[in-house]
């Protein structure tokens, strides 16, 4: 058996992420004892209408989130327990609502820093309505084998180690949440574990005091002894002592009190708990509490270090007197394990998962991405540039200084070509239609193809083919191309010609030629141009063809070649979009006089035939 | 509980309709020179000048001067401001009018679990403590106001004359209102006097303790809380309080000069048991500290840095229970970062470190601590199977 927390708790958690986290811990315990999950709803206005996903074993349970407590209890009439996980400024209102809700008879609050007056008003309200208000600052309530209310109990493995899957014989009541967990652990080490453990919170005025729970423990036949962890300040330990000595009690009271160090510390010092302070007129010292508890007949451990032994002795006495029969322990290994994640199985080598994809250029599993093994920050630190990054991510090689310079120049010269070309025009039209940056730029990029900017790869392909198979036989190459491919990609321009040469091309070629690198593909392309110019003055080696030949010469694979134009032109497209945006340009449309309407004359629509 | 100094304490009484002496708080010598211009009452009668700091025994330390005319007052203020008293620089001085009166009384409101007690005595000053049986009490439930008739009866019981009863009852009602509405935990007026000139009740001196946790609903509180242990906070303590006020969970530090055993424990409850164990073993504490509620790594690192900086320490005890939700791995990472920094700065020379902890990710956290051995730390690491405070016994026995 147990007190307060039991199999009948049906819980609403009032609060956000911290509450959801508590629910996850609670679900772990439900799973451990293979009992249904007992949190039915959350109240958290920002997420109202959504659900919170809680893992229960290998299932995902969806718990609804409501705007108000009213809605939650209307939809889940079984709710009888509320856990408060909201901030100190809203904790009073949330708790008051919960206490005023008919079906709810237990409210436990973990919120810290709640004003004393608020706590006192809630105590009064709970008393009037004959309900239990636990907290503020209370870690929660744990009944072994039955119910977990809050994060008390810690992680899954600790639940097993502290034998919380089945009841023992010891009740625990403490102000400190951390110690509640420690005592549950100790009770499992030095005795047969707990029935119920309650953190009442370390504030000056805990909603429910030791006596409230001692009375309940007294009536719980399974509980044979209660471990009370007190501390200096206030008079709740004295009240517990008075209760214990008032008449013959069935339960044995084990106690220890923190704060004997107080007289050696600066007067008036504040400890971690709000309630742990010296009382006025000398009341509330740890020493006094220890004396009073001893006098009342409690077994008092003079220090925390002595507590384990005291618990052990009391338990031995219970066994010797037949008050408690030794528990038949289930083998801890037979208790369910939390399902492990696939990653954990893989780590331990128990499972192999066939990868969905393979990546060979960038590894982001560490602190920072590695570009073909090189940490990005180190590349930056050592002065590498965007050209090197392209070399690494497109070609898995660090380009030489000359190669990097070529890449840089290619990008600069292809970055933009004014607003009239199809890519820029499309982006501008999109910008004027109010389309966002990424879509407008993507629209412009879509224009890149066989007729605009997209001939680099094909030019590279055929110039390389020619340089490998038709060296010195330009005419044969042109015959082959005419028969099998069509016009030579990379040759020809709509505007530029022999008489109006493309300055960008001349600059690039003369730079590359000034370097000490071999350029068989470029040389071949230039020979082709030499021959085609004899046929037509506009059959020049254009910028696509020049880039293509050079890039093949410095070792870039064919697949990457169009990428140079796409990357470079993206710079221009972004510029055009920003330009239009900053001008506040309005929607544009074509003038009708720019269209040749060569359409059918107006005529009558025939009836729709069935 | 949070202490409010006399100046703002009196202002609070005044806000709720109680008469207090005219007073001014001075924070610079410059201000002292123009004091009489801004406060003409200074030269109308006699004044008292006191250091406006959270200090005990101000009389003995010469930090209270009475019966001064305005010239003398200015001189006293100038002398007191900037004075170094056992390492504390006096930064504020309060100057208040002295009010001629005959009898002194006592009045206080004190929080209780059920509400508050109103305490009244027909005597005041130092006599109250010696005659506690003459202090009469009226308990008021939280959410209620005291009845006028009950307050009058209380005043009568405390021995006030019929003439004074209505005034005392009215004053008590106001004090209760102040306590209730300002989230007081304890407000004590001693002495409460009848001003000779006009028979008006005046609160001559006040001790004000408010509920610091209620600050969020009192944007009008324009004062800081003072340290409650008769000395001001140190810079390191203030730095940790500042961090504590803005992180999830909590970090706390109070320095205790002269101790050789530093504490860096987890949890408001466990930390006190660690302190007890040190004292029990005959050790001397160099501080009280705790971190709890799963604070962020950097906050724990900052606390570790301050703890390692405590002068003259021989050991640091990093204790804690088996945690519920504080991540041992994360908080230990903060502590380890702090330790490494301190070691580089030579602060850990000859300092032993003792660890005991359990909780979420305890294996990883403890393993990381154990690994510090290889970096040359003098560190002893224990897990949940060693009882919580045993590291205190082990470290202090070994140290002697």
Image: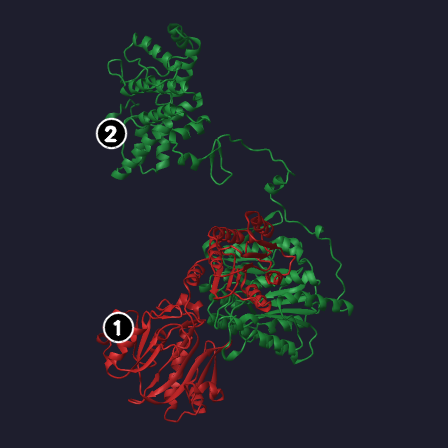
Chain colours: A green, B red
Residue placed under numbered mark 1 in the picture: B32
x 66%, y 55%: residue: A160
- Crowding near the residue tagged with mark 2, few <14, some 14–19, many ≥20 C-alpha atoms within 10 Å: few
For this rendering, which residue is in front, B204 or A122? Answer: B204
Q: Is residue B196 left or right of residue A176?
A: left
Image coords of residue A450 (percent x, y):
38, 21
The quarter of the displayed image where residue A426 is located: top left
Q: Nearer the viewer, mark 1 or mark 2?
A: 1
- Crowding near the residue tagged with mark 1, few <14, some 14–19, many ≥20 C-alpha atoms within 10 Å: many
Query: Residue A591 got which mark?
Result: 2
Q: Are marks 1 and 2 on the same chain?
A: no
Q: Chain of mark 2?
A: A
Q: Is residue B235 left or right of residue A37?
A: left
Which image quarter holds the C terminus of chain B? bottom right
For this rendering, which residue is in front, A457 or A298? Answer: A298
Q: Chain of mark 1?
A: B
* Image height of B251 relative to B160, above or below: above
Image coords of residue A242 (percent x, y):
62, 79
Report, in whole angstroms, how far the alpha carbon at label 1 lies from the one at label 2: 82 Å
For this rendering, which residue is in front, A596 or A50? Answer: A50
The quarter of the displayed image where residue A564 is located: top left
Image coords of residue B148 (percent x, y):
41, 86
* Residue A610 seen in the current view: no
Query: CB under 8 Å between callouts 1 and 2?
Result: no
User: Callout 2: helix, strand or loop?
Assistant: loop
For this rendering, which residue is in front, B45 or B207? Answer: B45
């Amino acid at each position: 058996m147990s007190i307060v927390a039991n199999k009948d708790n049906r819980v609403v958690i009032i609060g956000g992420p911290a509450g959801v986290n508590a629910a996850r811990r609670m679900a772990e315990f439900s799973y451990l004892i293979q009992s249904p999950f007992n949190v039915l709803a959350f109240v958290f206005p920002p997420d109202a209408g959504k659900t919170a996903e809680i893992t229960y074993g290998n299932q995902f349970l969806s718990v609804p989130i409501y705007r108000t407590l009213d809605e939650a209890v209307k939809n889940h009439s079984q709710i009888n327990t509320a856990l408060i996980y909201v901030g100190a400024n809203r904790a009073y209102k949330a708790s008051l609502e919960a206490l005023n809700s008919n079906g709810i008879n237990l409210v436990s609050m973990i919120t810290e820093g709640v004003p004393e007056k608020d706590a006192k008003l809630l105590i009064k309200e709970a008393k009037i309505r004959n309900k239990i208000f636990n907290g503020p600052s209370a870690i929660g309530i744990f009944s072994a084998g039955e119910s977990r209310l809050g994060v008390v109990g810690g992680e899954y493995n600790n639940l097993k180690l502290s034998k919380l899957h089945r009841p023992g014989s010891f009740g625990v009541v403490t102000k400190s949440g951390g110690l509640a967990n420690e005592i549950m652990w100790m009770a499992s080490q030095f005795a047969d574990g707990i029935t119920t453990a309650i953190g009442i919170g370390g504030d000056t005025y805990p909603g429910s005091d030791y006596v409230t729970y001692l009375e309940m423990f007294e009536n719980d036949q399974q509980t044979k002894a209660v471990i009370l962890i007190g501390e200096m300040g206030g008079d709740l330990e004295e009240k517990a002592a008075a209760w214990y000595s008032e008449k013959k009690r069935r339960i044995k009271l084990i106690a220890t009190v923190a704060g004997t160090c107080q007289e050696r510390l600066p007067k008036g010092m504040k400890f971690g708990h709000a309630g742990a302070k010296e009382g006025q007129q000398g009341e509330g010292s740890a020493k006094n509490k220890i004396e009073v508890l001893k006098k009342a007949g409690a077994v008092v451990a003079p220090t925390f270090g002595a507590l384990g032994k005291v618990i052990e002795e009391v338990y031995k006495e219970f066994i010797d007197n037949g008050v408690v029969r030794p528990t038949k322990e289930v083998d801890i290994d037979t208790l369910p394990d939390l399902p492990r994640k696939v990653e954990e199985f893989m780590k331990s080598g128990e499972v192999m998962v066939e990868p969905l994809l393979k990546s060979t250029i960038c590894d982001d599993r560490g602190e920072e991405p590695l570009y073909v093994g090189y940490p990005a920050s180190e590349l930056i630190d050592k002065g590498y540039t965007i050209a090197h990054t392209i070399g690494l991510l497109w070609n898995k090689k660090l380009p030489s200084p000359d190669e990097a310079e070529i890449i840089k120049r290619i990008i600069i010269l292809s970055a933009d070509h004014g607003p009239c070309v199809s890519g820029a025009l499309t982006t501008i039209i999109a910008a004027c239609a109010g389309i966002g940056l990424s879509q407008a730029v993507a629209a412009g990029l879509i224009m890149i193809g066989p007729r605009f900017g997209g001939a680099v790869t094909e030019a590279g392909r055929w110039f390389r083919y020619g340089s490998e198979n038709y060296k010195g036989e330009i005419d044969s190459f042109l015959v082959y191309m005419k028969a099998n491919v069509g016009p030579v990609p990379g040759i020809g321009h709509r505007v530029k010609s022999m008489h109006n040469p493309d300055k960008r091309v001349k600059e690039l070629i003369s730079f590359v030629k000034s370097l000490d690198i071999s350029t068989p593909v470029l040389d071949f392309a230039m020979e082709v141009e030499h021959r085609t110019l004899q046929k037509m003055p506009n059959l020049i080696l254009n910028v696509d063809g020049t880039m293509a030949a050079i890039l093949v010469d410095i070792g870039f694979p064919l697949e990457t070649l169009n990428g140079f134009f796409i990357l470079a032109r993206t710079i221009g497209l972004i510029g055009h979009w920003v330009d239009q945006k900053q001008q506040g340009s309005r929607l544009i449309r074509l003038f009708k006089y720019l269209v040749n309407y060569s359409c059918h004359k107006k005529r009558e629509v025939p009836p729709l035939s069935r | 509980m949070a202490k409010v100094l006399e100046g703002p304490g009196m202002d609070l009484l005044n806000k709720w309709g109680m008469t207090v002496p005219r007073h001014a708080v001075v924070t610079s010598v410059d201000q002292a020179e123009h004091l009489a211009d801004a406060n003409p009452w200074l030269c109308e009668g006699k004044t008292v000048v006191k250091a406006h700091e959270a200090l005990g025994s101000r009389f003995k330390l010469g930090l209270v001067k009475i019966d001064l005319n305005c010239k003398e007052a200015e001189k006293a203020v100038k002398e007191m401001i900037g004075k170094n008293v056992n390492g504390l620089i006096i930064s504020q001085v309060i100057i208040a009018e002295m009010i001629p009166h005959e009898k002194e009384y006592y009045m206080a409101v004190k929080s209780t679990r059920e509400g508050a007690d109103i305490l009244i005595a027909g005597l005041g000053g130092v006599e109250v403590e010696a005659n506690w049986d003459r202090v009469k009490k009226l308990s008021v439930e939280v959410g209620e106001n005291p009845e006028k008739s009950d307050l009058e009866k209380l005043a009568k019981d405390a021995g006030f004359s019929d003439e004074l009863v209505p005034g005392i009852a009215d004053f008590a009602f106001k004090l209760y209102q102040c306590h209730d509405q300002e989230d007081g935990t304890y407000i004590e007026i001693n002495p409460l006097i009848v001003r000779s000139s006009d028979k008006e009740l005046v609160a001559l001196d006040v001790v004000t303790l408010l509920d610091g946790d209620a600050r969020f609903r009192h944007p009008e509180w324009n004062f800081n809380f003072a340290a409650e242990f008769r000395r001001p906070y140190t810079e390191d303590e203030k730095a940790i309080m500042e961090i504590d006020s803005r992180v999830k969970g909590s970090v706390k530090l109070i320095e205790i000069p002269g101790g050789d055993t530093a504490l860096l424990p987890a949890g408001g409850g466990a930390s006190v048991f660690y302190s007890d164990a040190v004292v029990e073993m005959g050790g001397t504490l160099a501080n009280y500290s705790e971190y709890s509620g799963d604070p962020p790594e950097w906050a724990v690192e900052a606390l570790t840095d301050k703890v390692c900086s405590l002068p003259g320490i021989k050991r640091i005890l990093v204790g804690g229970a088996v945690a519920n939700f504080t991540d041992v791995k994360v908080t230990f990472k903060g502590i380890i970062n702090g330790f490494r920094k301190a070691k580089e700065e030579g602060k850990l020379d000859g300092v032993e470190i003792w660890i005991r902890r359990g909780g979420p990710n305890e294996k990883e956290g403890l393993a990381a601590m154990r690994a510090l051995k290889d970096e040359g730390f003098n560190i002893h690491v224990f897990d949940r199977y060693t009882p919580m405070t045993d590291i205190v016994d082990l470290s202090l026995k070994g140290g002697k």
